[in-house]
Amino acid sequence: MANKRIDMLNIKQLLRLYTQGVSKLQISKQLGISRNTAKKYISLFNEHQLTYEELIELSDEDLDDLFETPPTAIRDKDSIKKQLESLFPYISIELKRVGVTRYLLWEEYIEKYPLGYQYSRFCHHYREWCKKVNPSMHIEHKAGDKLFVDYTGKKLHIIDKETGEQQEVEIFVSILGASGMTFVEATRTQGKEDFLGSLTKALHYYGGVPAAIVTDNLRTAVKKSHKYEPVITDSLLDFASHYSTTILPTRTYHPKDKALVENAVRIVYTRIFAPLRKDHFFSLEALNKAIENLLEGYNEAPMKRKKYSRADVFREVERHALSPLPAMMYQLKHSVRATVHKTSHVYLSKDQHYYSVPFSYIGKKVNIIFSKNTVEIYYDQRRIAFHNRILAKYQYTTVKEHMPSSYQFMTEWNPSRFISWGRSVGEYCEQYIIKILEKKQHPEQSYKTCPGNPFIIKKDWQHKT
């Protein structure tokens, strides 16, 4: 029977034979179907402009939807395609939101435009549009998911005011996966202090914390590279703990792991390096100020072939998906080993200062971890003491509870305590003498009941009489 509906297996067989050059007559004979039925499915196949390889990857449900679409004769293909393409910038932004999928957006599209494309063609046209807009961007990053960081291979320069010598500076680059919002800073080195300082500034520039930070295999980030279990440096782990995020080092020899930031680096060369090539800077602060001005224009500029900027997507989609920043900005911490002295103190050689620990740890090896404002002391990964950092040489910072009971008792016997005690006793005795005089008693008759010195009482009596 003409135009008889056939199952999906026969459809695939029909189209395989057709793509191999078999005639419609031969196909109808081999499959036992009418020529008109074969013509119908071949016509739909050509209309949807799919290759055979793309078609066999579709599920039976998608194939069923594909071949149930109305014929092109009753709808204007060009207008429907233009209608769909006008939605692609919106679709691109929505796909960055957590939980949003292409199928969900297709459902919204087909509800609004009932004569629109079915799901398979919808995805096909969207993929083609993505290739035209940005051929290298094949991963759809979710908002607030990842921050990619790296250093540029090329360097900028500042001029030493005294010698006139040019000094190379490193350029740190970070980019959020979903919005492409970029942060750039010049630093003197790629060392621990500069790297963690730039990371901290980047998070505060964005005003939030992503779920993960993807780093290259820098020495300041990775102790030991490994395909599955790289070893992160202690300082970077401490940074991640402070900001409640995760560190994900890229795999060695896998440039696609950091393709987004690599592309950002190339754009930084064009948008920042090139405009600054003729300028001279005599301080790192002046260079970073110039970078900041160019960076703002770069983030606010509409992206090529798109109607929105990186900053637009960041403000609309990604800013709210970032976790809030902690109350205090991260401070770089240093670590040293020390032995607890018999005085129940450890010596921090950098400050030449002593800090107390509980006396039960006397003779033990401990780790002293100190930042700009605090000193923490650890034994077997457990914190046993915490102090505010004091920059006073050869002085002691002591917590009373850290000392043995005998020491605590002895520390109470000091000049101020004796003076205070003497004053209280003198006042008591004086009041006692006044009471005796009021009763007209001789002080020597009752001095034994006075807690003060009887000599002092007698002397005071003689003085008063």
Image (cartoon, rainbow, N blue to C red):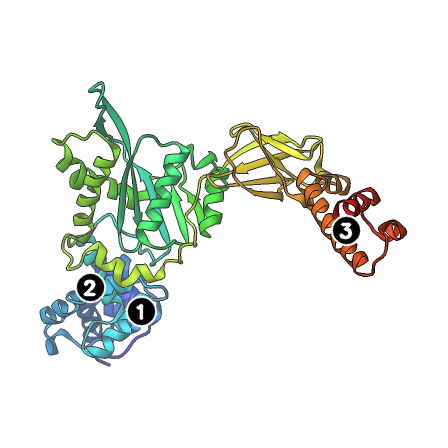
Residue positioned most to the bottom: 1
Q: Which residue is mark 3?
A: 429
Distance in Å between CA atoms under marks 1 and 2: 14 Å
Q: Position of residue 396 (x, y in %)?
A: 60, 34
Q: Is residue 172 left or right of residue 415?
A: left
Q: Earlier in the sequence, mark 3 or mark 1?
A: 1
Q: Is residue 224 left or right of residue 27?
A: right
**Foreground pick, 407 / 319:** 407
Q: Secondary structure at mark 2?
A: helix
**Residue 90 spot, x, y in % from top left:** 21, 65
Chain-order first, disc 1 or disc 2: 2
| Image mark count | 3
- Residue that label 1 marks: 103
Q: Outermost residue, top direction? A: 163
Amino acid at the residue labelled 2: Phe
Which secondary structure lies at badge 1?
Answer: helix
Q: Quadrant of residue 22?
A: bottom left
